Image (tube, grey):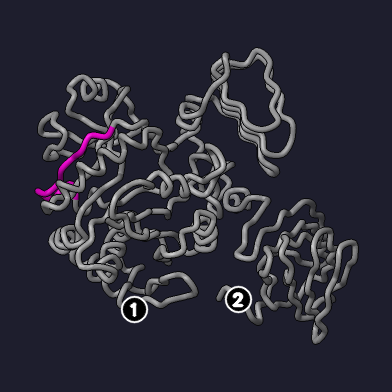
Amino acid sequence: MIPVIMSGGSGTRLWPLSRKNKPKQFLNLFGDQSLFQDTLTRLSGLDELQAPIIVCNEEHRFMVAEQLQELGEHKADIILEPCARNTAPAIAIAALQAQLLGDDPILLVLAADHVIHDHPAFHSAISKAKIVAEQGYLVTFGIVPDSPHTGYGYIEAENKTSSSKVSAFVEKPNKEIAEQYLASGNYYWNSGMFMFKASTILQELALFAPEMLKNCQLAVDKAATDLDFVRLDKESFSACHSDSIDYAVMEKTDKAMVIPLDAGWSDVGSWSSLWENHDKDRDNNVSIGDVILEKVTNSYIHSEHRLVSVLGVDNLVVVETPDAVMIADKHQAENIKTIVSKLQKEERDEAIVHRKCYRPWGHYDAIDQGQRFQVKRITVNPGASLSLQLHHHRAEHWIVVKGTAEVTCGDVVSLVSENESTYIPLGTQHRLSNPGRVPLEIVEIQSGSYLGEDDIVRLQDNYNRN
């Protein structure tokens, strides 16, 4: 059995914590691991489990690789999507790749951003699903509902047994219909998790989405290996119609089966669901970070950067980050996408990037900026290097505050130690490397007429970036 982890989502409903450059699946929302890492570690203990296939946005490739490395997972296949095309093409790609790895493996398709609290119950459902999948069915996991939720699609089962044929997939209902579903006992929330043989899903894709499968096959046939990644052919994959696996196959096939899952599942799709899945204080509040509350009830308060004090409110979401603050009524917090849309229309960076930006060599934090200057705190991982580059519009001063830097400036290579500094003139090719065994930390002061990230001319790069 091969786990297939779908990790291409943008997670805009949890803005400002989740943004395009680091969406929710890569955030540590419930402890020391990200949701992506939790998705993998909760599989521990399952029998005959092979290395996972990860399907992700190419912009997140180094984040995926780093988080896999933290788990000690070095054999995963990381497939890079050149553009977003929803779950059906992604699953088709994974199935085609899986057939290259084995005869006809069973695929366990999971989203990278779900929470499941009861791991034994989850493993039990997987074991039941495997038996059904081996018989040539397409299995979906239906979440046993505990409320008439209107934010999920539903699956209607033919009967209430431990595995059942699917009667229908239904869209998100209104409250009245959701209550009828809950009372009936044979409707489940649609989890978006699946299990099937690679050959079975490919056969059904050939039947119901032949053009999509053709383009996916071309994308795999023309794929290139780039470091530890499988880079799909852009032209072929982009030609795929964007469609979910539900619409493309599951709603049309006669092989759909549903396995009930009652394991404390959540897709963490809103601030309300994040609040629901956290431990709460005696006033029913979740508080994270440097927070002081007085006469506050039923609220979610999250501080990343500074003290947040809240007084005399109920049912609020307050989220503070270094560059944005979001305050919302908890019942309205699902509409945060409208705020993100406004930011995107205004071309605000806050919709896309965090103040702390992650790169394959480490990260930087833009701590201050003015009209002709910008200050960054840069951390370079041991043994890592930035690209050999130059800038047309800015000069840079580097001050080493921790570790030792190897600095290339023009034709000169030198070591710069703690409390020492160096200067990079405008237009001079340069490179920053960390030859040591501890993270290198520097303060960079940029000055010039233009300070944008697109004023980087890469002359050589260890990570094959343009």
The quadrant in which residue 263 appears is top left
The quadrant in which residue 406 appears is bottom right
The quadrant in which residue 264 appears is top left
| Residue 215 visible in the shown view | no
How far is mark 1 from mark 2, CA to CA?
23 Å
| Residue 319 visible in the shown view | yes
Q: Is residue 88 shown left or right of residue 295?
A: left
Alpha-carbon neighbours of circle 2 within 10 Å: few (<14), some, or many (≥20)?
few
**Local secondary structure at mark 2:** loop
Q: Is residue 253 magenta?
A: yes
> Vertical placement of 272 versus 231: above or below?
above
Q: Nearer the viewer, residue 390 or 163?
A: 163
| Residue 137 image label | none
Q: What kind of residue is marked 2?
A: Asn
| Residue 222 image label | 1
What residue do we see at 36% from left, 68% from top?
Answer: 238
